[in-house]
Image (spheres, rainbow, N blue to C red):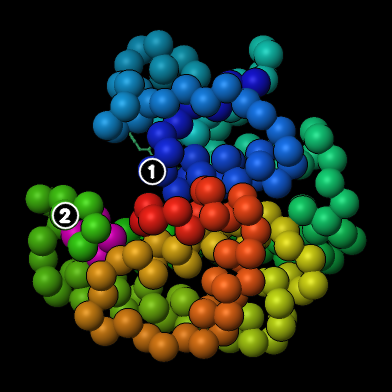
Amino acid sequence: MQLYGKPTSINVRKVLWTLAELNIEADFIPCGSGFAPIDTAEFRQLNPNALVPVLVDGDFVLWESNSICRYLVRKYGHPTLSGGDLQQMAKVEQWMGWQACELNPAWRYAFMALVRQHSAFTDPVAITQSTQQWQQKLHILDNALAQSGAYICGADFTLADIVLGLSLNRWLQTPLTDRLQLPHLQAYQALLAQRAAAQRFCFNGIA
Ligand SMILES: N[C@@H](CCC(=O)N[C@@H](CS)C(=O)NCC(=O)O)C(=O)O
């Protein structure tokens, strides 16, 4: 298998972390901004969106990070990573969908401004709005962790913790002036940081 991507990408790191939890190796092909170009006709044959990650498994090509993680777990098998029973699987899917569709759009402006320092993201009002929306979403996560007690779906570590752990790391690494105190997120970070794969691909100093 080959994994196309850049080690700084939160979406690529989801896949790298999943591979590590499964003890599976893939050839890593560095590409994306700062690495080999992906806005090329050749790369668009792999992913017409010109985005990473992309997994190539023989003749099979797959993009979208969450789909790649689920594919890997189903292909190699794991009793709990994608959820044990029907309802737990649904909860894992729920949090993965929430991270992609609700949480990610909230942080984008603030992150691009404060971490990437991108010239197109300099409006202070938009930075404040994005920060507030981001932290409102994290408040939801903090409350959910208060209920779940350990990992987001209960006693077992799942794919949902991989995508949420990377999101949590992004928030912690972003220099916010008005960071909310969210105690359950702090405990969650400490729990996830016990995993060797989390140290390599999540809490590794990269936002
Ligand atoms: N929904 C996609 C988003 C992928 C995405 O936005 N990838 C970014 C990196 S995080 C990218 O490829 N950016 C273009 C580049 O780096 O050149 C997924 O989850 O895989």
- Counting from the top left corner in percent of width and height, residue 121 is at 15, 57
Q: What secondary structure is the magenta-colored segment mainly? A: helix
> Residue 109 or 57: which is nearer the viewer?
57
**Does the magenta segment cover residue 112?**
yes
Residue at position x 83%, y 56% in the image: 80
x and y, in percent, of residue 186 in the image: 52, 80
Q: Amino acid at mark 2?
A: Gln
Q: Ligand 1 closer than 8 Å to the CB at disc 2?
A: no
Between 25 and 78, the residue placed more toward the observer is 25
Is 178 part of what is drawn in magenta? no
Numbered disc 2: secondary structure: loop
| Region rendered in magenta | 109-113
Count of residue discs: 2
Q: Which residue is mark 2?
A: 117
Label 2 or label 1, whichever comes before in sequence order = 1
- Quadrant in which the N terminus appears: top right
Residue 183 picture location, percent across and down: 51, 87
Lateral position of residue 11 relative to residue 96, left or right: left
Q: Nearer the viewer, residue 16 or 62?
A: 16
Instruction: Determine which residue is flagged by label 1.
Output: 8
Instruction: Kindly report the distance in space between the C-alpha atoms of the residues bearing marks 2 and 1.
Output: 15 Å
Q: Residues within 10 Å of mark 2 (few under 14, many from 20)?
A: few
Residue occupying the point 30% across, 66% down? 174
- In the image, 68 versus 174, the foreground residue is 174
Name which residue lies at 62% across and 26% down: 26
Dots 2 and 1: beta carbons under 8 Å? no
The quarter of the rendering in which ligand 1 is drawn is top left
Q: Is residue 150 above or below residue 96?
A: below
Amino acid type, label 1: Thr
